[in-house]
Image (cartoon, rainbow, N blue to C red):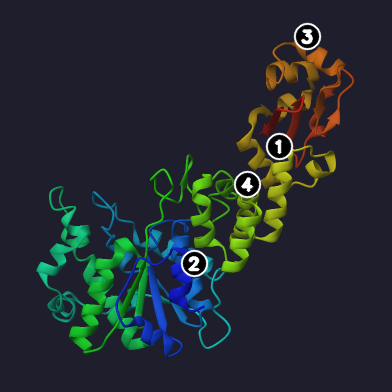
Amino acid sequence: MNFLEELEWRGMLHAKIAGIETELDKGMCVGYIGFDPTAPSLTIGNYVQIMLLKFWQLSGHKPIVLMGGATGRIGDPSGKDKERELKTGNELDYNLSFQKQQFFKFLDFETGDNKAIVVNNYDFYKNMNALDFLRDVGKTASINTMLSKDSVKNRLETGMSFTEFSYQLLQGYDFQCLFQAENCIVQMGGSDQWGNIVSGTEFIRRNLGEKAYAITTPLLTKADGTKFGKSEKGNIWLDARLTTPYQFYQFWINANDADLPKFTRYFSLKSRAEIEALEAEFANNPIQLKRILAEELTKRVHSEADYQAVLKVSDILFGKADKETLMSLSAANLAEIAGEISSSTISRADLSAGVGILNLMSERTKVAPSNSEARKAIQNNAVSINKDKIKDPTLLITPDFLLHDTYIMVENGKKNKHLLVVEG
């Protein structure tokens, strides 16, 4: 299956410039997508375009990741109804360096003639002064064409700075630079980037007398019409420090059933035959399809070890996990659990003095409404500390019970779980 056929069956092809089929049939082509480092990490929204580059490379073509060291300093107005807040140079440099490393997880930068490369578009402009820019770049662009772009038209009433207005000039000139330096003939991106991408093909036609091409994907939205890539807690990041592997996994598990066919086609590396077979097998069991997709993506974006830890955390929260499972969790895993269930803090000094189990349950953790109810729960064999059943209502809880010197798991029955966190 060639690249365009792959995109078409996956529902990932929005528009293309005619003639690209002939170029792709000739053999390996070079194509790129630009990423502005305006955030501390790539997000699952960026992952749509990462998958586009991945399918491009798997089809035998060479991908270029163009990092926006220059365009990130300007701010892309596409899809925005107001001016962006500009990032500092230090912020952009840090973000770019971190995101560059993230890309190495998703594309092959080491093997084959079509191994991926990273280019920073700041290199195109760092030695260019304002007069050079106006002569070499500005002279090519038509104001009439620039004003016709949706990213501009939608802002004419609310206002747009010359800085953001000029963004499409940089994106167009980027394409010309990559065409000259890397023989790059294709720029890809989301459908909201079509105008900017076509500006680049015009630069190449006018300035170089050559032909270049564009491919765009539909903007991915959820079944309810909301923007893809966010949860109730905000962005879904591809960095475990910002979105934990458990939260990442749960994003897919909690997806609307109606979104599942689209999400699977956009993000799974399974073949068409494999995906359609799974959909037939689990037609009446969408949760299993979600688990399969969540497993594949958690392993790819994070790791096999992270996926196994996610299963353990899920077992603690929703299953019948035993003490061995609890003891195998890392401090980071326990911190994840603290974010998913009720939790409270206690000072290290208070715990060092010892806290009675009844007081711990009724006052410190609220897993029981009163001392008498706590005592009754213990008598009914319903209470456990760190998965050990408690028989003695006079038990004193001390630092000896701490997991990773910080946490104590308190449970009253199957569903009433609480994590006590020591501070200080």
Determine whether the residue tagged by mark 4 lies in a helix, strand or loop: loop
Q: CA distance from mark 3 to mark 1?
A: 28 Å
Choose top left, top right, bottom left or bottom right for residue 167: bottom left
From the viewer's perspective, tell me whether residue 353 is left or right of residue 166: right
Residue type marked 2: Met
Residue 228 drawn at (x, y percent): 43, 51
Determine whether the residue tagged by mark 1 lies in a helix, strand or loop: helix
Residue 284 tag number: 4
The residue that disc 3 covers is: 372
Q: CA distance from mark 3 to mark 2?
A: 57 Å
Residue type marked 3: Ser
Mark before the other along the chain sequence, 3 or 1 = 1
Determine whether the residue tagged by mark 2 lies in a helix, strand or loop: helix
Residue 48 drawn at (x, y percent): 45, 62
Is 132 above or below relative to 360? below
Image marks 3 and 1: residues in contact by CB distance under 8 Å: no
Mark before the other along the chain sequence, 2 or 4 = 2
Between 141 and 90, the one lying in front of the other is 141
Q: Nearer the viewer, mark 1 or mark 4?
A: 4
From the viewer's perspective, tell me whether residue 25 is left or right of residue 293: left
The residue that disc 1 covers is: 318
Q: Residue at x 53, y 77 (%)?
A: 58
Residue 94 drawn at (x, y percent): 44, 62
Residue 136 drawn at (x, y percent): 17, 81
Disc 1 crowd, CA 10 A, few/some/many (<14, 14-19, 20+)? few
Residue 51 tag number: 2
Q: Nearer the viewer, mark 3 or mark 1?
A: 1
Determine whether the residue tagged by mark 3 lies in a helix, strand or loop: helix
